[in-house]
Image: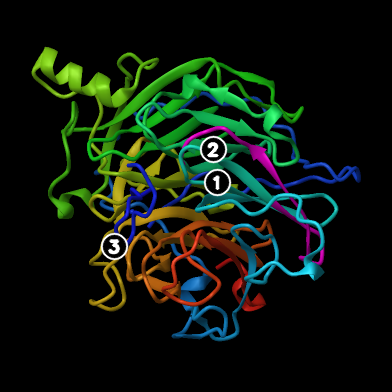
Amino acid sequence: MADLNLDRRRFLQILLVSGSAAALAACGGSGDGALQIDQPSPAAPIPDTPTSPEALAMELPLSPGPLMGIGPLQDSGVDGIRIPADFSIRRVAVSGLTADTPVPLPSLGIINYPWHIFPDGGAVFDLDDGGWIYASNSEIVPGGGVGVLRFDSEGQITDSYQILRGTRRNCAGGPTPWQTWLSCEEVPDGKVFECDPLGTPDTAQELPALGIFNHEAVAVDMTTRTLYLTEDEGDGRLYRFRSSGLVTSINGRQGLDMQNGVLEVLEIEGFESGGYQEDLRQARTVKRVNWAPVVSPERAQGQVRAEFQRTNGRGAPGTVFRGGEGIWIQEFKQDERLTISGAPNPMRAVVYFACKGDNRVYALDVDNDLIEVVFDNEQLIAPDMAFDDVDNLTVSPMNDIIVAEDGEAMRLMVMNPNGPSKILLQIPGGGSELTGPAFTKNGKYLYFSNQRGSALGPGIPGLGTTYELEIPDKYLTMI
């Protein structure tokens, strides 16, 4: 996530539009009001990727979701936000409040947890009673953490509370298939914390084995027992953590052991040891990747890389990804898995991740170890729509890839992999960024925040406002 200082977009932060990874997990129903999921099946080994006699495909066979069918934007009547026709939007939280009103009123009743300052990355967790929870980070230091809004089956807010406190600059993160939230600290010695959406700050757990660096976001692939993590640094890396096995998680469900495993960095063939793909045309072509062990994973990686360069005269392991941001995983059903020329496995799962330093979104085929750039600023419908820092990223249940903008235009984009993309919504006024996009399990609602926006009007500085965008039913069918 972008730095916050006293300039127009960095207000009060110390220190691009984002993207995909851990898919929203399904919930079972036990009738006790707790979060439910199916128990994970035994993990399969990470597939090998032998060289195929076929020529390697130039592009991954990726398709957009139904939201690519939206029309022009128009005024929603709420805080100057522009949305497509037939969509609707409401304000659900303002920093210091938890309801759709800009000032405290007696009618609000007791507020258990005043909504936090600078809301950032988020995710939705569905409940078996038909309701759901939206978890959201607070990107401030000191005093970050995670707060949640709880909704009933009618979409009304019934509770708000904190599930992590005392951390620093909680930027993005990611949900797990076992229904916990992984919150990431974006500081040089940052860590990841696991939180229970139905828990308290006391139930949260620190996860140093996931690496010590400027953490941004994380995605989980249960099949291979692997986590993928982005790093928000100009010379950052893409990491994966291969878990040692299964354990009982903080919410009592079976999840991955995130205290024991192997931390590695991705290397694109031909761009190892600090190499970077300068040529965008080349980056848009599918490349093979390998994984290398992280040097001194128990230490802050920015410092480790600097020392490695001085000592060895070359870059530390890993290809450079400039300013890693959002990450999300898109998993395909058995009958949706397409074959790829030159690859041994059908395309089961793709990790999307955004890099703000060069405004690129990458797609990583996790079973075939293939990567390509699937979005850059030449891939928007209009030439004057260039994105300013791709940032948070999410994927809907209908396979719509949504990327947020950390820039003055303040937009959410519907990404069309390797094709012309569209703008989903825009908040005029600048001075902030859009954060935390996340869908409910049925795809009906999309939550997001204007991180430093105010409910008093466009362009008026504030401490953060969170919204709910309702998606028309015609866009809730897979294409």
Which mark is drawn over residue 183? 2
Residue 268 is situated, as x and y percent measured from the top left of the image, at 24, 35
- State whether residue 442 is above or below residue 302: below
Q: Residue 205: within the magenta? A: no
* Residue 21: mark in rendering: none
Q: Specify whether residue 162 is painted magenta.
A: yes
Residue labelled with disc 3: 388
Q: Residue at x 35, y 17 (%)?
A: 299
Residue 177, percent from left and from top? 64, 38
- Going from the N terminus, do you reach mark 1 or mark 2 first? 1
User: 345 above or below 362?
Assistant: above
At label 1, the amino acid type is Asn
Report the side of 342 relative to 366 (left or right): left
> How far is disc 1 from disc 2 in space, using C-alphas?
7 Å
Gap in angstroms between the C-alphas marked 3 and 2: 24 Å
Rendering quarter of residue 269: top left
Q: Are marks 1 and 3 in contact (CB under 8 Å)?
A: no
Quadrant housing the C terminus? bottom right
- Residue 191 horizontal side relative to residue 385, left or right: right
Residues in magenta? Answer: 149-169
- What residue do we see at 48% from left, 78% from top? 69
Hey, what amino acid is under mark 3? Asp
Report helix, strand or loop for mark 3.
Answer: loop
Residue 244 appears left or right of 155: left
Q: Pointer 2: residues within 10 angstroms few (<14), some, or many (20+)?
A: many
